Amino acid sequence: MGYQPGKGLGKNLQGRVQPVDAQFLVEGKGLGYGSVSGFVPKIFFGTRTHKQINQMVKEFRRTAYCKTRMTVLGSREHTCIHPEVSRSFNKSEGCQQLNDMLSESNPGCQYRTRGIEMLSKHVYGYDNGWDIEDLVGLGQKLQRCPYYASRDLMEQAEIIFVPYNYLIDPAVRKRMKIPIEDNIIILDEAHNIEDSARAAGSGTFLQEDFQLALIDCEKVLQIPATDRKSRDRLHQIGKLAKFSSYMMNFMDNTGKNVFDDETIMTGKELVEKFTVENYGPNILAEISFVVEVIFNEQNGGRSSGTSPIKVEEGEEKVESDSKLIDTKLHLLAKTRATLEDFLMIVNLMVGDEQTHLDDYQVAIVRSKKRNMKIEASNGFNSQSQWTYALKLWCLNPAIVLKQVRESTRSIVVTSGTLSPLDSYASELGIDFMITLEANHVIPANRVWIASISQGPKNTILNGSYKTTSSFEYQDELGRVMLSVCQTIPHGVLCFLPSYSLLEKFVARWQDTGLWQQLSTVKTLVCESRDSYAFEETLKDFYSAIEDSQRSLNSSLNSSGEEIIDGCQNKRKEGTPSGALMLAVCRGKVSEGLDFTDNNARAVVCVGIPFPYLKDKQVELKRKYNDKKSTCSALLKGSEWYEIQAFRALNQALGRCIRHKGDWGAILLVDDRFAKRPRYVKQLSKWVRASIRHYDKFSPMLHYLSQFTNGLVKEDAAALLAVQQQALLQSPQEAILSIRNISIASPPSSVRPKNALSTAIPEFVEDNSLTRSS
C-alpha cells in the first residue's frame, strides 16, 4: 500500500505503510491502549520551524486526541531560561560551556541540576496539549530547565512534535536521543525534505575548527595521569589530537594547489587521499569509536546513540566504562561537534561498501586568514596568509534517509508541492506505495488567478536575470504594484526571487518617488533576513491589517453603502489602508506562515525563483542528475533545476486561500507563463486549473477589480448583518459578536498588544501528503 494527497483542507500525501496491527486501534482509546504485544509506537510529527509547530499544536488541541500524552522538542534558542545564557547570541554554545566542565566550583546550569522531574510532572497538568511557550512559562515558574524537560517527556509521550531536521539529520537525532526505530514519522511541509536531507549529509569544516579541537586535546594531554583509566583516556585523546593535526595539515597541503579560490574533487578521490596517508575507512572507524566512548563517559556513561562508523573485525576495540572520568580530562562539546559531525559524513560517504563515493563532491576553499589569537603546537604552518575550508557536499538525499526508511514503522509526508511524484520518491530513495493528490476545497468563484505579460506602459514583464536589472522593468513593476495595491483591500503579499532583487527594487522605487506613492496606499514592510527584525516586521504588518479592518467596520452605515462603492481601500487622503509585504520565495514568509482572510487578499509573484545558476552546488547537482538519470528515475539536471523553482513558487502562492470560506487573488507577473505551457503545467493543480493569461494590463486590472469588489460586498454584507444583530444583544454580547466576525486574525505569537482577539479558526493549508514504512 502507498499514498500521496494533494490539495484540499489537507495536503498532497504519499507513503508506504504496513498493515495496521489491531491492538493499536482497540475501542478507539488511542495508540497504546489495549496493546497485546506491549509495544506502542510513538508518532513523531515533524514540520519545518518552531512557529509551524505552534500552529500544529493549536490544531492538535482542537482534535479528539488532545489529551494524548505529548511533548514538543525545541532548541535552546527557544527554551533556555538561564538569566545569562538566554540573553547570549548563541544559547546552545552558552549552555554547553556552562555544563562542559562540571566541578565543585562549577556545578553547571542551576536550572538543569535542580532536576527536571518536577517540571515533567507538572506539564501533564495541561489537559489539552501545550506548546513551547507553555513549557517555558512553566519552567520559569518552577525554576526548571524546559529544554531538558521536553526531552525527558519524550519517553512517556505518544506524540512528539519536532522540527523535522531533528528527525532527518543523523547527528542531531543522535544528540537528541530520538528513538525512531519501529515508530511512526509524519513530515509536514515535505517539499523541503530533499534539500534538508542533502544538507544533513553535507558539512563545512574550517581549519580553525580542527585547530580548536587540537588545542582542546593538547590542553588535556598536559594533565598527568593518576591511574590506569586516566592513562587510557589520555591515550585515546592523543589519537584525536593527532587526527585533528592531520586534518589541519591535509587542508593546508591540498589547499596549496587551489587556484581561483576553490578546487573540487570527488568523494572517491578524497577517500583515496586519506587512505594513502594512513587514514583509510578502518582507521576513521576506530577514531569515530574513540569519540563515541569519550563523550559517552563524559555524559555519565549514558549512550548518545550507536557509533557513527562500525569497527570492523580485527580492529582495536576501546573499552567503555560507565565510571566517570575525572572532569579535568573532559573535552569541550565544540570538539565533539567537529569530530563527530565530520566522521558521520565520512561514514555516509564510505557506507554500503563504498557505493556512495560518487554521490559526494568535495571542495577545498581558501580565504584570507583572520587574525587568530590561538596557536597550535602540533606542526600546523600558521605562517600562511591563507586559511582553508573543507566542504563535503552530498548530492543524493537518499543516503541520509536510508536509516530513517529502514528503521521506522511508517513514514507519512505531506505538502502541496511534491509533484512530480515519481522523481520526488526517486530522490528520497523511498518506495511510496500510497499516493493521493486531492483537489482544493475553495470554490472556483472565490479565487482569481492570472498571469500578466505587460505592464501599464506596455513594457514586457519578463523576470529573467538580465531583464530585472533594467530600470525600465523595475519602474514598470512598481507601477503594477501601485495599481494592485489601489485595487486590493487590506493585505497584499509580493514575492520576489531573491533578497538582492528585493533590495534593488526598493532602492529604485525610493529614488523615483514610487515608494512614497505606495506608502500613501499601504503600509510598506519588507521581509528581513534577521530573525528578530522579522518578528517585528510581522507585528507591523498585522497591526496595519487590524487598523484597516477597524476602519472598515466603522465606515459601514446601516445600508452598507460605504463598502459597496468602488475600491474598498477607503482611507483619509495620504493615509495608508492595509499593508504590502515584500517578501522572498524560500524565505520565512513563503514557507508555512498563515495569512488567512484579510491578511492576504492578494499574492503577487514576480518572476520565477530559479536557484542561482552559478552556485557550485547547483551546478554539481545538475551534472549529477544528468549522469544518474540515464539509469534511474531521477530527473535530468535541467528538469530538476526547474522543479526547484516551481516548488518554491507554489509554496508562495499558497500563502492566501487558507480555508474554504477564504477568498483572494493570485497574480503571476511574468510573460513566460503565457509563452511556455510547460511552466503552467508545473504549477499546483488548483492554480493551473483556474489560471487565465492577460497580454495587456488594463483588461487584467478591470477583471481583478470586478472580482475584488464582488467579494468585498459579500464580506460587507456579512459584517453588516452581524452589526445589526449586535444591536439586539447586550453590550457585552455585541462586543463579542463583532470581534468574532473580524476578518483579519494574526497568529497570537505576533499579534500586537492592541489587537482584537478573534474566534476565527486557522485552517491547515492546502497541500500534499506522503506516507511510507
Image: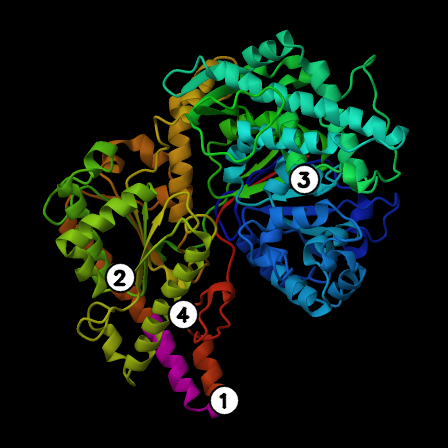
List the residue tagged with mark 2: 488
- Mark nearer the N terminus (1 vs 3): 3
- Mark nearer the N terminus (3 vs 4): 3
What is the three-letter code of the residue carrying label 2?
Ile
Q: Name above or below for residue 174 compared with residue 700.
A: above
Q: Which residues are magenta?
A: 715-731
What is the three-letter code of the residue carrying label 4?
Ile
Residue 732 tag number:
1
Task: Name the magenta segment's main secondary structure.
Answer: helix
Residue 300 x, y percent position in the rendering: 82, 42
Q: Mark 3: give few (<14), some (14-19) or many (20+) Cα within 10 Å.
A: some
- Mark nearer the N terminus (4 vs 1): 1
Residue 743 tag number:
4
Residue 333 tag number:
3
Q: Quadrant of the C terminus?
A: top right
Residue 169, magenta (yes or no): no
Say which of 547 and 9 sits in front.
547
Q: Mark 4: give few (<14), some (14-19) or many (20+) Cα within 10 Å.
A: many
